[in-house]
Amino acid sequence: MNKKFTSFALSSLALAVMATTGQVVAEENDSQAMEEVVVKASRLKGTASAVMQERKNQAFVADILGAEQISRTGDSDAAAALRRVTGITLVDGKFIYVRGLGERFSSTLLNGAAVPSPDPTRTVIPLDLFPSSIIESLSVQKSYSPSMPAHFAGGNVDVRLKTIPTDFVFNVKGKIGGNTNNFDDGLTYSGGDDDWYGIDDGTRAAPSDLTKLWDSYTAINDLGQEDNRQVAAQLNRDYDPVRESINPNTGLDLTLGNKFDFDDFRLGFLSSVSYDNKWEVSEGYEGQDFTQGAEGNWSLVRGFDEVETTEHSVRFSGMLSLGLEYRRDHRLDFTSLILHDTRDEISDKRGNTNNVTITDGLRVRDTEVIYEEREMISNQLRGTHNFNDWWGLGVDWFYSDARSNRYAPGNVETRYIVADGYNGEPEDGIFDYVNESSLRKATTATRYSFQDLDDEVENYGYNMSLPFTLDSAEVELKFGGNFIKKSREAFARRLDINTLAFNDLDLSGHQLNSILTDDVMLNQPLRGNEIIMRDTSVAGDDYYSGQMVDAYYVEADFFFDNTWRLTGGVRWEDFRQVVAPLDPATGKFDLPAVPTEDDLADLTFKEDDFFGALAITYVLSEEMQFRATVGQTTIRPDLREVAPATYIDPLTGFPIGGTPGVESTDITNYDLRWEWYMETGENLSVGLFYKDMDMPIEAVQSPSQDGPPLIRIANAEDGYVYGIEMEFLKDFTFLGDLGAINGADFFLSGNITLSDSEINIDTQRVVEQTGVSTSITNPTRRMTGHSEYVLNFNLGWDAPNGNHSATLAYNVFGERIIVPGIEGKGDAYEQPFHSLDMVYTYYPTFSSTLTFKVQNMLGEDKELEFEDTLLQSKTKGTRFEVALKWDF
């Protein structure tokens, strides 16, 4: 439609550079130059030609990453790749923050359809689930348009999967690597026989007698002593950490696809299988409670100053895409996808509590096993139709049925008390964690937790467009609908092992399975009426929830004299949500016997509204354009944020509790952007943004008597975020030939985001909303998760003969609030992480590719601090990998 967005001539370097940085690839007018770059272009072109053209033609502000750019930087999944996008930071390796706004302020689509999240701690699907090998492109739309969901503030991420190939493709890629932290021994434990492919074989699962009690809602705490101990003895206790050498990281990717042309039809398929098996050893520090001295310094009171952790992750995925095309006017696509990710982590922690102090010659030692399987299965059918005989009418539609699951069986925490001089050992000020150790004598010496979460999302929709011409204006009218049904079923149980139940039992030792043997569990005399296993699940651990969204939109796009483009429209959404907590003891709704209207109203959330947007583009020349957009959107509380259940934040390890009374955030979004696309393929863009928020959803901290602080979800009064973004791509042709180095073979690309934010919190309102009394240290502060700066730089080199390429990638974000402070203690900030990665690629033959990559070359650690006091830290090590890909 935009006639000024035409192809232009490129130098050979620009062709290669732009192919690897998501830029447009056009045909080289000079035939001799074409001969020089044919090898490089054939290898690197990929998706690049469409990527920049799409970005340029967008009416609304968007950034797009192509498959080749992702490959260039060596990022293994969608989450890692997106941190290269302007203004985006990565949290916990899984979730993105766009323009300093937390993940709740963004949304994720898969091929334009809503998908469920298998992670109960986050609103959106963890993007690390998507391996880069199946991704065609990643689109991040930063300004709102009526054709997208109104749940929008930071950005909307659309993960677009690969579809029908242009030719036969069959390749195999093998990977092997490791981490410098893994050179020393790590921790393992006795898991299952199927751990190598991320499936629990039942080793960690709840025993059958226990599940029967849950199914029949028989109260475990009401069982007789003998019945209780018989069930308790069936729990797996073989979780003791063992030191041993760590295996290397391995991976395998296979891709097979082809297309078949006959008459007016084209049929094609693409299949992909990916497997990764990785280990990561780390050391850390976990502070929970601190006391302030007379001079204002903070000292650790409760927490762990020595933490050793080994995480074993197994990830596999499978994708099948089928496509049928008729005369290039009609196309049907079917995509089936399965993503499976398993995290198996064991930790050995040493520290103190408020009651177990080092001044008394005591230490605590906690061992913890966290095991979870996350899985998403999605089936999508999409259609695209162009009716040239009907005034060019365009229709596209889709149907998506996706479900996700998080299965976390038998996570186990065990506490030991270590006493200097215990068990006949010398009192020498040195703690012997083997010989001076004993299992904690308490009602909760060991805690088991079992969780199961099922999400299902059905989403279907359609879009219609009608282009026509009016004198000097080109017009396109659009109309569409989108309908979402989402359901969730959450199950959680907590079981505590009570060592006080045993009569005259020697608890000495440092291994649970050696202290609480089968003989002890079944035959050791018990005290009074004490029982060994106690169910400490609470109301709200189980819940049902549902969500429905019906939406329609209209949009008009006008392009006047190939100079001015005006796009606007409005969207109407009808949103309904219900969260019903269950009593785990009965399986019934956790409501009063005679619920009031207010009781029922707390379970439901309904609203409908109109959301408008307007975008203006001024095309100054074939190379330069200006954009301005404004849009009204909302951020609604997600199921997890209004459910009464408590979940653990994987970033901090702190519990987070939902709040049923949380309200929606109303947002007005403003964007200005200048873009310059030069004939050489270089580009430069500068943008301004401002977002005004009413009732922003935020995290606040509530006091905690024992254990880590509790984080609650609440509404602030108002807030805003604003900033400036700059993105550029520059080659070094101007340096000319410098002997062994030719400046034309190098390029530099990058982006910079500088921003600020502020929210105002009414403490009394938070108390009324959450029901928890708290004294917020900074009621006026930056938003949680907001970084004042984000920098990305990529220095690339391409050999003139096309046989070598290398990229040095740098990324850093400014400090960001993770845990808001209370009672005079400052906010806790995640510290800047300077990530320097290198990727070198060698093409021995046209069919083979050898890649070597190193990540976190600076050896940065992840750290959280408040008032210059360390709250948490974790070593990350330097990761390295060698991969060989062969195209048949």
Image (cartoon, rainbow, N blue to C red):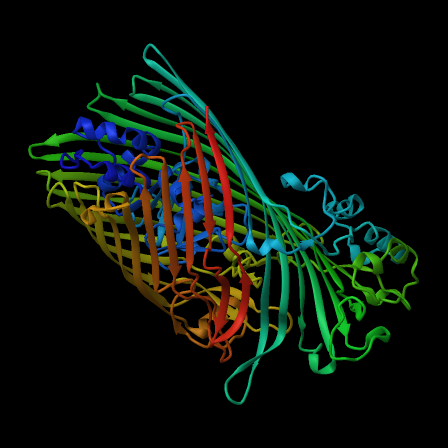
Residue 143 visible somewhere in the drawing: no
Instruction: In the rendered view, tell whether residue 386 sits above or below residue 665.
Output: above
The residue positioned 41% from the left and 40% from the top of the image is: 841
Instruction: Give the camera-side residue of 837 and 98.
Output: 837
The quadrant in which residue 89 appears is bottom left
Quick one: which residue is furthest to the front in this view?
Answer: 739
Q: Work out whether residue 841 or residue 580 is closer to the camera in this orientation and state it.
A: 841
Residue 433 location (% of width, % of height): 75, 68
Q: Is residue 888 above or below residue 485?
A: above
Q: In which quarter of the image is residue 798?
A: top left
Q: In this view, does 590 lie above or below 342?
A: below
Q: What number of labels is visible?
A: 0
Instruction: Please state the horizontal and vertical placement of residue 174, each as a whole percent of the image.
Output: 53, 35
Say left or right for 156 vs 709: left
Q: In which quarter of the image is the N terminus?
A: top left
Residue 154 showing in the rendered view: yes
Left or right of 525? Residue 852 is left
Q: Left or right of 675: which side holds 692? A: right
Question: Which quadrant of the view contains residue 446?
Answer: bottom right
Q: Which residue lies furthest to the top in this view?
A: 263
Q: Which residue lies furthest to the bottom in this view?
A: 294
Vertical position of residue 96 compared to residue 871: above or below: above
Residue 392: horizontal and vertical position, in percent?
21, 24
